[in-house]
Structure formats: C-alpha cells, structure tokens
C-alpha cells in the first residue's frame, strides 16, 4: 500500500533532517544568508505548518462536516491541479514559488528543539496517513488548505507533502553548506 511507502519516505526524511541538523545550535539553525531567505529552523517550521494545515481537513472528513467544492467532482480538474502542485514541489524543481501567508514561518528566532519538534510531527503525520487508508481507497478529493478552488485527491496530497519535505530538506542542506562555508560559528 502507498501508506507504507509514504511512511518509509517520511522515516528516511526524518533521519536525514536529524543527521544533518540535530547538532546545530539555535544560532546555526536560525542563521540566514540574507533577510529575505529562510534559515534552517524557518524551513523546518514551514514544513510542519504545511503538513499540519491538512489535519483539520482530515478531521472534517472523519466527522462528516467536510464539503468538497463541486468542481472537485470533475476528474480532469482534480487530476490537473494535483499534477501541477506535485510538479511544483519536486526536489529538482528550480523555480521558486512564493509561500502563502498561511504557511509563513516566524521571523523571530525559533527554538533549537525544532528538529525534535519535526521528528514528533513526522510521527503524527505517519499516523494520519495510516488512519486515512480507507479515504485514499475511496478516492476522496480535498481542496488545498490554502485555497478551496485548488482540488486534488487525498492520495495526491500525501504525495505533495512528501515531495515538499524532500524539496525543503535540499534547501536546508544548501543553507547549511552556505553557513558552513561562511564559517559561521556559534557564540558562547
């Protein structure tokens, strides 16, 4: 089942984030090359925020209060939107996209336990995926938490989340490399 693949991917992503960033200080995690670029901590917080924005959607589906927009019932529309969004978050996608306000990380310093928060979040996400297997099998269509007009299958939403995490891991690695090459050392 795809849930096993997503779970395995999330475990691997979690290991990579921990291996790469777990030992960094708060200063190193929050370091930014410039004011308009996120630091590693902001990237991790953003990933958590995006994923968690889907949790209320799942809860509404479960309690019967979720309403899929009418055009979400038109197959080619939700396939088109799903494909567009999924392609836009691929790790090898060079084109940057502007993050919606809903998913903007804090501008102030983020605590150094953000990597532990991420690890805990990943467990919650894996649980949400496992608990959604029946919804995936039923081909449930949802709208993006950021825009009700953008619709795609729940299965595609999980593909999007995993690809998005991989993309931002790569971004965080690049920031960390840049930080290291500039020889930024924590102050003691």
Image (spheres, rainbow, N blue to C red):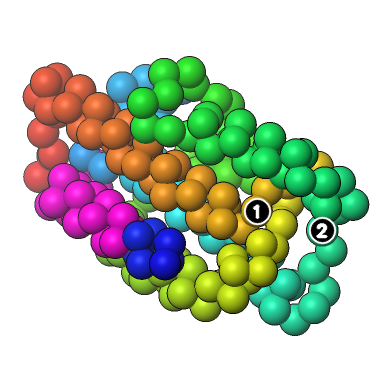
Q: Which residue is drawn at 14% across and 51% down?
A: 19
Chief SS of the magenta region: helix
User: 149 above or below 124?
Assistant: above
Q: Residue at x 32, y 31 (%)?
A: 171
Quadrant, the C terminus: top left
Residue 35: tell me if it is visible.
Answer: no
Disc assigned to residue 153: 1
Residue 165 occupies quadrant: top left
Drawn side of residue 9 relative to residue 43, left or right: left
Rendered view: 183 above or below 134 = above
Q: Residue at x 29, y 61 (%)?
A: 8
Q: Local crowd at mark 2 within 10 Å, few (<14), some, or many (≥20)?
A: some
Q: In which quarter of the image is residue 31?
A: top left
Residue 118 percent coordinates (x, y): 35, 59
Answer whether residue 133 is visible to the viewer in this image.
Answer: yes
Magenta run includes residue 44: no
Does dot 1 land on a helix, a strand or a loop? strand
Quadrant in the rendering for residue 55? bottom right
Residues in magenta? 8-27
User: Element under label 2?
Assistant: loop
Find residue 164 and report its horizontal and vertical position in percent: 44, 42
Tag 1 and tag 2, C-beta contact below 8 Å: no
Closer to the camera, 162 or 115? 162
**How dense is the environment of label 1, judged by Cα within 10 Å: few (below 14), some, or many (20 and up)?**
many
Above or below for 22 versus 43: below
Whole-number angstrom distance, CA of label 1 to CA of label 2: 11 Å
Q: Tell me the residue that label 2 is attached to.
A: 68
Left or right placement of residue 45 versus residue 116 in this view: right
Q: Where is residue 30 in the image (x, y as percent from the top left)?
A: 31, 40
Residue 147 appears left or right of 116: right
Is 14 colored magenta in this rendering?
A: yes
Q: Earlier along the polypeptide chain: callout 1 or callout 2?
A: 2
């Amino acid at each position: 089942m795809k849930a096993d693949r997503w779970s395995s991917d999330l475990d691997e992503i979690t290991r990579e984030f921990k291996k790469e960033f777990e030992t960094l200080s708060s200063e190193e995690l929050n370091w930014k090359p410039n004011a308009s670029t996120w630091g590693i901590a902001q990237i991790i917080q953003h990933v958590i925020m995006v994923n968690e924005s889907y949790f209320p959607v799942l809860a509404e589906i479960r309690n019967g209060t979720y309403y899929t927009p009418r055009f979400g019932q038109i197959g080619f529309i939700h396939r088109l939107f799903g494909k567009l969004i999924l392609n836009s978050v691929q790790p090898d996608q060079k084109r940057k996209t502007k993050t919606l306000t809903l998913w903007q990380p804090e501008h102030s310093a983020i605590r150094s336990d953000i990597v532990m928060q991420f690890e805990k979040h990943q467990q919650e996400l894996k649980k949400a995926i496992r608990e959604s297997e029946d919804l995936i099998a039923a081909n449930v269509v949802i709208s993006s938490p950021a825009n009700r007009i953008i619709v795609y299958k729940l299965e595609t939403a999980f593909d999007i989340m995993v690809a998005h995490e991989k993309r931002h891991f790569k971004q965080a690695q690049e920031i960390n490399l840049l930080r290291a090459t500039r020889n930024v050392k924590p102050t003691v």
